[in-house]
Structure formats: C-alpha cells, structure tokens
Amino acid sequence: MDIFTYTFPNGIRLVHHKILSPVGCCGIMINTGSRDEKDEEHGMAHFIEHVIFKGTQKRKTYHILSRIDDVGGEINAYTTKEETCIYASYLIEDFDRALELLHDITFNSTFPAKELEKEKEVIVDEINSYKDNPSELIIDDFEELIFADDPMGRNILGTPEKLMAFGQKEIKRFIAENYHTDQMVICSVGQMEPLKVLKIASKYFKDIPGNLRVNGRPALKPYRPQQVEKNMDTFQTHIVLGNIAYDFNSPKRLGLLLLNNILGGPGMNSRLNMALREKNGIAYNIESIYSPYSGVGMFCIYFGTDKDNLNRSMREVNRELKKLREQSLGTLQLHNAARQLKGQITIANENRESLMLSIAKSFLMFNSVDSLETTYKKIDAISASDLMAIANEIFSPELLSSLIYKQS
C-alpha cells in the first residue's frame, strides 16, 4: 500500500494514500468521543459535531456549506464513543479548498449563541426520532447495561436536559480538554503527490499550538452479566444478548471479527440469518455486532420477532452459539469464511470515502496501516481452533447478558 506519513511538531499526524482517481477524500479524525465526556457534558461531543459548521471567524454557516458544495463536493461529520471526524469529498483540484475548510471549522469555529439554540432543537428532534426506533434504542440500552455507570455505556446523543445547559463556555472548555493535537490524524486519499499534500497541509496545520494528551482513558468497572426485561409499546419483541469483548489491541480481535461475520455478519448466508429467517421464518432482521474500543470491546446479537416466537428464537440463537463453541469448522468452511471476509474488506476499500476513514482510524489507533495483502495473511493465519477458543471465551452462556423489549 502506497502510504505517506508525516508528524508535525505539534503532534498532528498526516497520512496520504495516492490512488488513480479524479475524486479525492480527506478528513480530520480526533480521538475524542462521548466516552470522554463528564456527567454534565453528556452529549457534548455530538453537539460539537453539529455546531462546528455554524460559523467561524471568517465564515457564516452558508459560506461553510457552500465552500465545498459549490464545486460539486460534499462535507460531513460523525461522532462515535471514541472519535469525532470531519471529512470531505471533492474533485482532486479542490484539495486545498477542502483542507483549508476543514482546518477553519476545526480550529476557528465561533459557536454563535443563536445558532447553538437552534441546533439544540434539531438534536432534541433527533433524540425523539431515535426513541421511535426500538431496534436502535435497544443497542444503546444494552451498552448502558453492560458498561454500568461508565461513560462508555451512555448514548452518544445525550439528553435534552443536558443539551440545554451547553453554551460557548462549556464547548470551548471541552475542546481545550479533549481535542489533543497528538490525538489528531489528517488523512487524504487521492491522485496527488505526497510532497504536494504535505506542502498544503503544512500551510494550515504546522503552526497550530501543541496540546498533548497527558492522561489516558480510565479503566472500566468489572463486568457483571445481567438479564433485564422491559415492557414496551412495540409491534415486535426486540432482543439483544452479548458480552464484553476484545479491545483494539487484542491479538484475538481479527479472530472475533471473522467469527462475528460467520455468525451474524452482513452476508445473507450468516448462520443466524439462515437459522431464524431462511429456515424458520421467525425473524426478519437479525445480526451480530462486534465493536472494539480502547481497553474494551462489545459483542452482541440483535433480533426482533413476534412475542409468540421469542422462546423458539432464543433456542435457535443459543444452538448456533453452542455449535461454534463445540464444533470445529472444517477446512472448507474456514476457507470460505476467510474468503468472504476478505472479499467484504476489499469491496469496502473500493469506496474512496470508506477507504480514507479506514486508513485514518488505523493510523489514529495503531500509527500504521496494513496493506490488503497483510490483512489477508492475518485472516488466513486464523485457525479453526483459534475460533473455537474465542467462541468459548465470548459466547459462554454464563457470561452473556440479555435485554428484552417485550410487547406490552
């Protein structure tokens, strides 16, 4: 993989991947998310992601949005539990324009009071619409269950009550305390020479004062399995069961990713989809999710079904988990599973935006980026016995928590 990297004296890292395409993508990824919020700051990271577009020292909202839109590009942002990212897609001749804009909104936003109040209402609507979607809400509630009172378990959006207390002072304090320059990565993918990318990036980022992270994220409280049921006014019964899992740095992370793909990944031939939907017709939507974080991870299975099929569905899910714990994959099964995962990764990398974000996340977490060939070798090195051992660690019945939204 053709990767160019550079670290500015202030700690900001630059990574560029040259590809033959007239379309480029770049972004600023910051190792800060909802997990880094204090209790009174719940929802702050996501709120900043919204209001960062509402004005800078030299631009109003319209000028920010039009700067890239006027040349046919797109600008966007997202927040997760551990990261905030602002990114853009554009024609390659507009790279300077895009990177200057990302710099401006990241470091020069003014957060006008009038705009803050308007955006609070927008996010309250977002929170309320989220509550109307039990298949998403239950995942947040499950994370709150398994991570107890830790910020890791809180939803990203926050609460209306906490949002209303946010002002310029609180926003600027959060940024000063959490937007550390050595925890920022500028990533670029496009048909540009690395030295030109460095020259343009240096123009905007090299003189930013350093703000280095001193303390890491605190350790989480010990995990305790729990089983919870809630009566909800829903058309289906919604179920999540799962466990804490491996973190980003675990050597077993890729093995669990492969196992998750076999069990309930995006393929229609996943074991859970075949068992519940194709063979028995008792669930429309079923999936398993593995999310690795710093120092911890989360694995869960979600599905929705009619209340009369709840016990039958649970038996089918537990049967598939038991198979993975007790029955080793055959040579052909393992080969096909590895090939499927490699294919999914390769196809995802053909999306320039997805590729850029993947490179940025890898460089942010590991300070390196694996080529596809290296990733393939790591996947091929996973044995059937590795997968069975992982299944027994993560899918052990006594370690699984469950949350059920029962039809009232």
Image: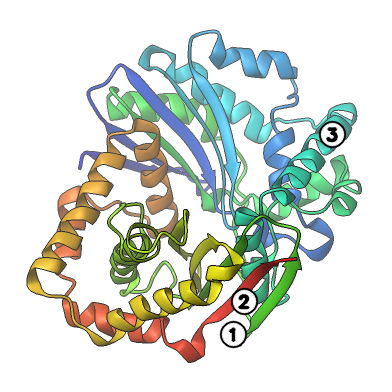
Image location (x, y in percent) of residue 206: 51, 35
Looking at the picture, does residue 104 appear above or below residue 273? Answer: above
Q: CA distance from mark 2 to mark 3?
A: 33 Å
Mark 1 highlights which residue? 223
Image location (x, y in percent) of residue 185: 47, 44
Query: In the rendered structure, are the residues bearing label 1 and label 3 in contact, judged by CB atoms less than 8 Å apart?
Result: no
Q: Is residue 218 among the parts visible in the rendering?
A: no
Q: Which label sits on residue 146? A: 2
Image location (x, y in percent) of residue 264: 37, 62
Query: In the rendered structure, are the residues bearing label 2 and label 1 in contact, judged by CB atoms less than 8 Å apart?
Result: yes
Secondary structure beneath dot 2 equals helix
Q: On the picture, is 372 further left or further right than 276?
A: left
Secondary structure beneath dot 3 equals helix
In terms of depth relative to the viewer, which is nearer, 133 or 345?
Answer: 133
Mark 3 highlights which residue? 116
Q: Residues within 10 Å of mark 2 (few under 14, many from 20)?
A: many
In terms of depth relative to the viewer, which is nearer, 207 or 122?
Answer: 122
Name which residue lies at 61% across and 52% down. Answer: 180
Looking at the picture, does residue 132 appear above or below residue 352? Answer: below
Q: Is residue 28 among the parts visible in the rendering?
A: yes
